[in-house]
Image: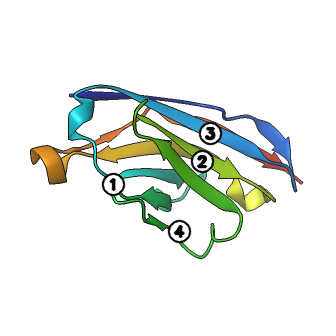
């Protein structure tokens, strides 16, 4: 079992920045991929950024150039730096970790942190 706690969500003006944090606890030795997803109001959850255990990162077009994912593997923490925020970035942001590669386990999700970007 892995527990995830996100923090850092806030109300921010368009063009502003936020840094989200997620700390994992429990069976942290199983963690490989760490990622951030978001769910805008009335929409499906979507991928925002992925950090693989080998250091590679992946971003969808909506996040490229504005969002940066980073991780501190020693602390089992993952971060999402968001710059040039737009109203359409308003969403609940979720941290996800994958334990399939190392422990044949499931994905775990945090409880979410709300980001609201005002125009």
In space, the residues marked 2 and 3 are separated at their CA atoms by 5 Å
* Residue placed under numbered mark 4 in the picture: 59
User: Which circle's residue, 2 or 1, is located before the other in the chain?
Assistant: 1
For marks 3 and 1, give the one nearer the viewer: 1
Name the image colouring.
Answer: rainbow
**In the figure, is residue 112 to the left or right of 85?**
left
**Residue 53, disc:** 1
Callout 3: SS: strand
User: Which circle's residue, 4 or 1, is located before the other in the chain?
Assistant: 1
Q: Considering the image in quadrants, where does the N terminus appear? A: top left
User: Which circle's residue, 3 or 1, is located before the other in the chain?
Assistant: 3
Q: Position of residue 50 (x, y in %)?
A: 44, 59
User: Which circle's residue, 3 or 4, is located before the other in the chain?
Assistant: 3
For the residues labelled 2 and 3, say whether their Cβ atoms are less than 8 Å apart: yes
Q: Judge whether 9 appears above or below 25 on screen.
A: below
Query: How many other residues sit within 10 Å of disc 4, few (<14), some (14-19) or many (≥20)?
Result: some
Query: At x 81% / y 59%, what residue is drawn?
Result: 84
Number of residue marks: 4
Query: How many other residues sit within 10 Å of disc 1, few (<14), some (14-19) or many (≥20)?
Result: some
* Residue placed under numbered mark 2 in the picture: 80
Query: How many other residues sit within 10 Å of disc 2, few (<14), some (14-19) or many (≥20)?
Result: many
**In the figure, is residue 36 to the left or right of 7?**
left
Callout 1: SS: loop
In space, the residues marked 4 and 2 are separated at their CA atoms by 11 Å
């Amino acid at each position: 079992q892995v527990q995830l706690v996100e923090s850092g969500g806030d109300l921010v003006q368009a063009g502003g920045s936020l840094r989200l944090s997620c700390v994992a606890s429990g069976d942290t030795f199983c963690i490989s991929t760490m990622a951030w997803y978001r769910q805008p109001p009335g929409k499906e959850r979507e991928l925002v950024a992925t950090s693989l255990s080998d250091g590679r990162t992946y971003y969808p077009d909506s996040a490229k150039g504005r969002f940066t994912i980073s991780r501190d593997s020693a602390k089992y923490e993952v971060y999402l730096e968001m710059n040039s925020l737009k109203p359409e970035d308003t969403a609940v942001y979720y941290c996800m970790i994958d334990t399939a590669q190392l422990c044949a386990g499931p994905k775990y999700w945090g409880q979410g942190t709300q980001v609201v970007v005002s125009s």
